[in-house]
Every structure is written in C-alpha cells, then in structure tokens.
Amino acid sequence: MAMVIGGIFSVCYVFLVGFVGLVLSLIIYHFLPLLLINLGSSSSSNSLVVPKGNFGWPLLGETLAFLKPHTSNSLGSFLQHHCSRYGKVFKSHLFFSPAIVSCDQELNYFILQNEDKLFQCSYPNSIHGVLGKSSMLVVVGETHKRLRSLALTLVTSTKLSPDYLNDIESTAIQILASWKGKHQVTFCEEARKFTFNVIVKQVLGLTPEDPQTTKILEDFLAFMKGLISFPLYIPGTPYARAVQARTRISTTVKALVEERRRSIGENKSNKKGDFLEILLSVNNLSEDEKVSFVLDALLGGYETTSLLMAIAVQCLGQSPLALEQLKKEHHNIRSLKKKDEYLNWEDYKKMEFTQNVINEALRCGNIVKFVHRKAIKDVRFKEYLIPLGWKVLPVFSAVHLDQSLHDDALQFHPWRWETQGQTAKKFTPFGGGPRFCPGSELAKVETAFFLYHLVLNYRWKAEGPDQSMAYPYVEFPRGLPLKLDPIVSESSA
C-alpha cells in the first residue's frame, strides 16, 4: 500500500514539476523580448525606444481583446483604449508574437512602401494551411513579384474587355430579374451570387448552369467559413473542412485546366484568349502556383467585392440625398444609351459620383482592417525602434476613421471625395506599395455596374437593424435583409 501511495505521489510530483516548468517557460518566452529590448536599450547610446504598450497574458497576449468584434465603421474598444493610453503606435503581444500596432498614417505608409526591404508579409500559419503555400497572399520575395506581375497583366487585359463588361452587366440584370415578385431579399447572399457568377465566368469560363459551378460554389462556401477560424485540424471543425474544401477545389480546377489544355492541343481554333488561356501560356509558374492563382482570383473577386456592394447599399439606404444624386447620375447615363445597349468603359468613367460613393463605402466599411507584416531587421522610424522579428500590424481602419484626417470621419459623406484627394497615406482600402491589390479596379467596376441597375429599378429599405461587423473579417450578422419596392414606371436599362 505504501509503495502504491509512494508511486502516486511520485507521479503527481513529476506532473507538478512539469506543469510549473511549462508555465515558467511560457512566462519567460512571453516576456523575454521585453527583457532583451530593455537590456539592448540600456547599453545603447541612442534615444530610440520601443513604443509603449502592454504584453497582456502569457502566450495569448492581447489577441482575444484585439479580435473582439465591433462595428466595422468604428475602431473598437481595444484600439480606442490603447490609442488613448499609449498613442497611435504601441506595442502588444498578438498572434503568439511580440507586435507593434500602428494607427498612424505615416508609419502605415512607411511599412507598406518598404515591403521586402524592412518588412515582410507574415500571416499566421493557419492562413497558410487554408490558402496554400503558393498563394499570392502569403508568398514573399521573387515569387510574389512573379505572381503579381501576372495578376496585373490579366487585370489590365480584362477590365477593358467588352466581353467582361457585358458579363458583369448581364449577370446584374439576371440577379435583379430573379427578384421579380419578391418583397424581401437577403442582400449579402444576392451580392455573393452576383460576384461568384462573374468571377467564375471570367477565371474559369463557367456559367451558372455548368455542373462544375455548383460544385465549386459548395466547396468555396466551406473554404470561406474556415478561412479565419480557430486552426484546429480535427474532422468536422470549420478549419478542417476548409482545408479539405481547398483540396477539392484544387482538383476541380486542375481538371478544368487540363481539359482546356487538351482542347487547345486538339484544335487551335478553340482558343478563347481568356484568363485561363493566358494562365496556361505562362511557363514560369508551377501547376500548384497556377491553381493557387485561380483560388486567389476567386477569393478576391467573390468576398471583397460582395462586401463592398453590401456596405454601399446599406449606406445609400441611410443617406437619401446621396441616393438621389446617384440616381440622377445614372439617369443621365441611361438617357444617352440606346435601348438594350450595354454599358462600356467610357460610361464607367462618367460615373464620378458613383466613384465617390464607392470610395466612401470603402472608407467607412473597412473591409480590410489591418494586414500582417514582420520586421526583417531592426527598424528605426522617428523616435521608435521596431525590433527584428517582431510582428507589425498597420491598422487601415484607424486612419480611415481618424477625425484629424477626415472631417466627420464617422459619417457617410461621399461628397468629401469631390475635394479630398485619395492620398496613399490616408486612404488604403486595398493596401499599398508592392502588395497593392491588383484587382481593386475590377471590384469598383462590378459595384458601379450593379448599382446602376439597382437604383434605376428598385427602391429598398433595411428590414430591421443590421450593421457590418469586424470579426476581424467583415460580415453582416443577418445578411442585410432588404424590403424591395420595384420602380414600375421605369424599365431596366
């Protein structure tokens, strides 16, 4: 009996020592960067200092508070508290790393412009697991330059294509036609349907009627749900389903690529000169990089654009004067068109107030709240030291909502863009520097064409309260339900 008790005591003792050791290790690991910085600064003759701030709890740091949901047209309690206490630049411990958080337009611009020189893209490993190691969103250096160069080539050839513009408009007309007889729609679902149909047609040459389209959409929805979820790979979790969905999408895309390659090989006249064909002609990309490139295009064209549309529609519904001016602009454009004549690039360029509405929706909605970077060397900025290896988070929303940079910053006021220039420092909805989103103009074109047909054919009103929330990804909790009132006296353009 004594031996059994002694054995149990020994096991408990070993477990207790191990547990205490683990806790102490976590604490030391958590606060070691601060100790090293303090030792370094005490022996340094310069006056540079790491910004003030708080490291929070061991391991987790302040991550949970930083990610606490809040309306996307606000800073949220975490940033409000830290900026008021420490200033617009402060230190923290986020995503398992010591971090510098910047809500300062000058530092944000400095970070974005010094990509691969002083800073480098550094998203959490869980994002890599879902997007894939070859995604343009996570690769760095020369690989990113090659992929972005291809993206710019494809975007440039696409946005001026009459077929692309016609596809956008015909898809918008189809979506609005499906509302006939309905008194209410969930707008976020309709916007995603619109953007998915457009991007799948442009990237893969598929129509909504093709069986592969339904298959890709089902997998893509699972992919999106797990993209920013807890990175726990256990069967049935959103993260695991997202990784599995990406594998299935990759298989489908590879099959479509191979089918197109075989079709062209059998008959040169089958060439279409579209996105997929241009991608096939590129020889300096591996098959995995091409598949990842397609997924990146689907992701950017699907979620970001549909959210922009939803935020614009919500804001217009709350601003009768802006909606009325938008209608007048589109009435004027329609008056110059023949019956059933499609919109073109010149029409898009005439949509000046529409551009103001879109810019203001981007500023207020903050679809991309912040991006992940890390310092690849000790960085000196003004009086601050940003240590090598620390995570750096430039917060775009803080600059967009800064009262010292934008008058009545919390108000939707599209007229501000008639006099306020889109400087790269105070307006960064699509990032900046070498990682500026190459598809930003396509998102604006699609939104503008959809709004053209929406305001000429429907009135709408929000069905109950629903506000875009930052989780940090932006989402409308109820999907933005709208009451519809068709404009019977005016026919579709």
Image (cartoon, helix red, strand yellow):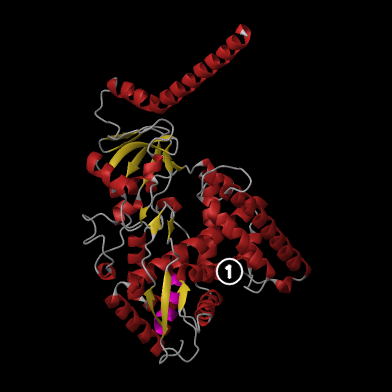
Closer to the camera, 295 or 154? 295
Residue type at mark 1 is: Gln
When the figure is inspected, residue 180 is found, relative to residue 307, above or below; the finding is below
- Residue 262 appears left or right of 10: right
Percent coordinates x, y for residue 62 in the rendering = 37, 38
Q: Which residue is mark 1?
A: 202
Is 426 one of the magenta-colored residues?
no
Q: Main secondary structure of the magenta part?
A: helix
Closer to the camera, 254 or 13? 13
Is 449 one of the magenta-colored residues?
yes
Name the residue rendered at 42%, 65% in the picture.
Answer: 308
Closer to the camera, 466 or 209? 466
- Residue 445 appears left or right of 248: left
Percent coordinates x, y for residue 27 in the rendering = 41, 25
Can you see residue 354? yes
Name the residue rendered at 53%, 62% in the picture.
Answer: 153
Can you see residue 103? no
When the figure is inspected, residue 465 is found, relative to residue 48, above or below; the finding is below
Name the residue rendered at 39%, 75% in the picture.
Answer: 349
When the figure is inspected, residue 338 is found, relative to residue 143, above or below; the finding is below
Percent coordinates x, y for residue 357 in the rendering = 34, 70
**Name of the residue lying farthest toward the top:** 2
The residue carrying pointer 1 sits among few (fewer than 14), some (14 to 19) or many (20 or more) residues within 10 Å by Cα, namely many
Closer to the camera, 193 or 333? 193
